[in-house]
Amino acid sequence: MSEKFKIMAQFIKDMSSETPDAITFLYVKEYLKNYKLDINISSKALKNRMIEVNTKLTYHDKSKSKNKSFFEITYATIIKIDEEVKDVKVMEKIVLCDVQNKIYPSLEKIFLNLLNDSGYPGVKIEKKIDFEDLYKKRTS
């Protein structure tokens, strides 16, 4: 089965690493294992059957601790949907699942580099995101 879209461009739209001070840095270094990864996908129709897909990863501590760092990246992907695609459900699957499966390995590498370059080497995202499963849960 051939893809029903083409990736026209990919770029980092926004990237943030916030650690307010040295005390927080030392605290976070010890408790980074408590941080959780959230993902949010949004899209915006452009013209000529093009869509901007924004994939936002946020790595943060949901505890009540005052010593927190915050890491976030918004990665934009511009796609062009094939002419024969008319069904909104098919477009939704392309945006939420197919595009994500294509871009996520690169996005994860960029995000891990951000964490590493922010002074937190060796961070790994243990749980791989199953976009097919997330899509099925969302539509059921």
Image (cartoon, rainbow, N blue to C red):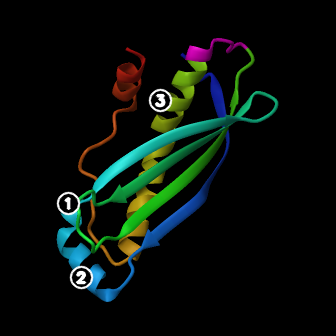
Q: Position of residue 17 (x, y in %)?
A: 44, 70
Q: Position of residue 4 (x, y in %)?
A: 62, 22
> How far, Cα to Cα, is label 1 from label 2?
14 Å
In the depicted structure, whether residue 91 falls above or below residue 18: above
Residue tagged 2: 26
Q: SS at mark 3? A: helix
The quadrant where residue 33 appears: bottom left
The amino acid pointed to by label 1 is: Asn
The amino acid pointed to by label 3 is: Cys
> How far, Cα to Cα, is label 3 from label 1?
27 Å
Point 27% across, 56% down: residue: 62
Point 38% across, 62% down: residue: 112
Front position in the image: 65 or 49: 65
Lateral position of residue 51 relative to residue 111, left or right: right
Residue tagged 3: 97
Identify the mark at residue 34; answer none if there is no mark: 1
Q: Position of residue 54 (x, y in %)?
A: 58, 44
Few, some or many residues within 10 Å of mark 1 (<14, 14–19, 20+) = few
In the depicted structure, whether residue 26 falls above or below residue 47: below
Q: In terms of sequence position, does the residue under pointer 1 or pointer 2 come before the other? A: 2
In the depicted structure, whether residue 64 falls above or below residue 48: below
Q: Are marks 3 and 1 in contact (CB under 8 Å)?
A: no
